[in-house]
Image (cartoon, grey):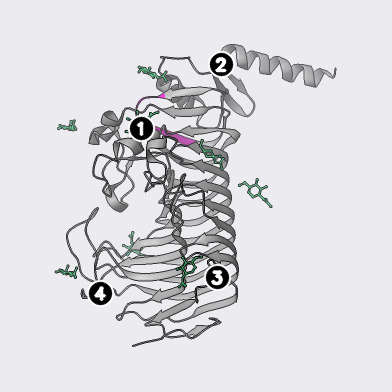
Amino acid sequence: MKPSLFTHLCIDFLRIALGVATTQHGKTCILSPLGVGKDDTDQVLAAISRCGKGGHTVFRPGGFNITRKMTWELEDATVDLWGYLNFQPDIQYWLNYNNTYRVVFVQSQALWFVVTGSDFIIDAHNAGGINGNGQPWWEYFTQHTKADGDGRPISLTVYQAQRATIKGFRIESPPFWSNCVAESQEITYDGMFVNATNTNSTFFGQNIDPNTDGINTFRSNNINLFNWDITCGDDCLAIKGNSTNIHASNYTCRGGNGVAFGSLGQYVDLPDYVENVLLEDFTITRLDHSIQPNMGGGVYFKTWTGETVGVPPTGGGGGTGKVENVVPRDFTLNLVDRPVHVYQTNGGNSSETPSELQFADLSFMNWRGTADTNRVIDIECSAAAHCPGMVFSDFNIELAPSNLTARYTCINVVSERGIAGPCNATT
Ligand SMILES: *[C@@H]1O[C@H](CO)[C@@H](O)[C@H](O)[C@H]1NC(C)=O
Ligand SMILES: *[C@@H]1O[C@H](CO)[C@@H](O)[C@H](O)[C@H]1NC(C)=O
Ligand SMILES: *[C@@H]1O[C@H](CO)[C@@H](O)[C@H](O)[C@H]1NC(C)=O
Ligand SMILES: *[C@@H]1O[C@H](CO)[C@@H](O)[C@H](O)[C@H]1NC(C)=O
Ligand SMILES: *[C@@H]1O[C@H](CO)[C@@H](O)[C@H](O)[C@H]1NC(C)=O
Ligand SMILES: *[C@@H]1O[C@H](CO)[C@@H](O)[C@H](O)[C@H]1NC(C)=O
Ligand SMILES: *[C@@H]1O[C@H](CO)[C@@H](O)[C@H](O)[C@H]1NC(C)=O
Ligand SMILES: *[C@@H]1O[C@H](CO)[C@@H](O)[C@H](O)[C@H]1NC(C)=O
């Protein structure tokens, strides 16, 4: 055995024995779960406070019991998460406004876990991540009203962070959105697995987990989403206001509503800008009806109307802005209801003032697979903001059942190209 390797083993042994050690690369903290009935929140926060700046934190396998809201401030740091952060399913505790953070402005969402800082890596090695214990939450909300900003917590929020990587991360049973990236730049998610699947047979055939989105992006620039596998009851990816330079690649959506741009235009005083979004190598696939009945969209775009009715998080509308240069390419669909859908009457109706938020330059390239309705392309732009540059190439979605005839709708579209049949371009 070479002395250098032996020395390393000794240092590793010391680190393990002491739980914390100093090396030339900074401190290392190693944690193991305390065990059934014990609360791990203190030891997790202590480790991040000791080793989260210029250091290395290692979570051993197992479940870490997290009982209160938690922020990790990481700078120039690495976290190896071989276990799960297990958020205790005390619904009434988390629904108390004071027990979550409310830093994600859009729809006043609640959060129980915030990661912030710069130049860090969180690697969960496809072995760990977060267990949101969502099953009792989903069941609770079959009996209680669901509303935007009602306090259901986002599982993992990257907030005001820069130059960071989240790798090989798993989120089991999120009660609500599994991820959110807000007010951040240069964040790469490489390997994200989410599974929001109801396992109570009483609810088979129903979607009891709406809002279990894969991720929402908000006020963020240069975000990479590579190698995602999302099973959920809602948007597998939702791009909200002021998301720019977003690149998603190799992304599987199992059940739910597909990829959303929106809702946009909810805040009358805050225009939403979305620019340069490349989505490539997506598979969007329907699940067994008893497990998840929804497979609503391929990619859909939605704004509120031009009228402000009520106030956010539940009401709103009247916001302006623009979505431009969006390229969804290399998509495979399996029995999706509406492959491409644009509408500008979310939360309102067509007799309200039309939205001024504009969609421009959306290019759908190389699409394959099947739709289970005839609404293959349905682009309904606002009378107050017509859409230029709706481009389709190599767009081959077949209909199942095959006795249907494809229907193409283009309303208030300035220019479109590549649609396989007549698109009733009215007004
Ligand atoms: C988590 O910690 C709390 C104490 O704060 C305890 O009551 C609960 O049983 C623990 N949960 C688990 C799964 O160990
Ligand atoms: C939240 O905290 C504030 C300030 O401490 C307090 O006034 C309020 O009653 C608390 N709300 C709840 C629901 O506990
Ligand atoms: C998601 O969880 C359900 C229920 O545990 C399981 O049957 C299913 O295989 C999981 N999905 C994936 C993609 O692993
Ligand atoms: C399934 O949900 C029903 C209705 O809420 C509940 O009564 C039952 O206990 C649940 N089953 C399990 C195994 O949790
Ligand atoms: C695509 O992502 C999945 C994980 O969701 C991964 O297993 C697979 O290797 C990736 N494919 C490529 C070509 O990288
Ligand atoms: C988006 O950014 C613009 C400035 O570029 C700002 O005026 C607007 O308020 C922002 N909107 C949101 C939702 O933050
Ligand atoms: C449409 O919206 C307006 C304004 O919010 C409302 O007064 C009206 O009742 C709505 N009409 C329908 C048919 O829902
Ligand atoms: C298409 O076929 C299905 C059975 O495969 C049938 O239920 C449906 O009514 C048919 N629709 C039309 C428009 O003929």
Please give the residue where the numbered disc 4 appears in the rendered image.
350
> Which mark is drawn over residue 136?
1
Helix, strand or loop at mark 4:
loop
Helix, strand or loop at mark 1:
helix
Residue 242 in view here: no
What residue is shown at x 54% (from left), y 22% (from top)? 62
Whole-percent x, y for residue 203 in the image: 38, 40
Q: Earlier in the sequence, mark 3 or mark 2?
A: 2
Helix, strand or loop at mark 3:
loop
* Residue 3, placed above or below residue 185: above
* Residue 229, placed above or below residue 71: below
Q: Is residue 100 left or right of residue 42?
A: left
Helix, strand or loop at mark 2:
loop
Please give the residue where the numbered disc 3 appears in the rendered image.
402
Please give the residue where the numbered disc 2 appears in the rendered image.
19
Q: Residues within 10 Å of mark 3 (few under 14, many from 20)?
A: few
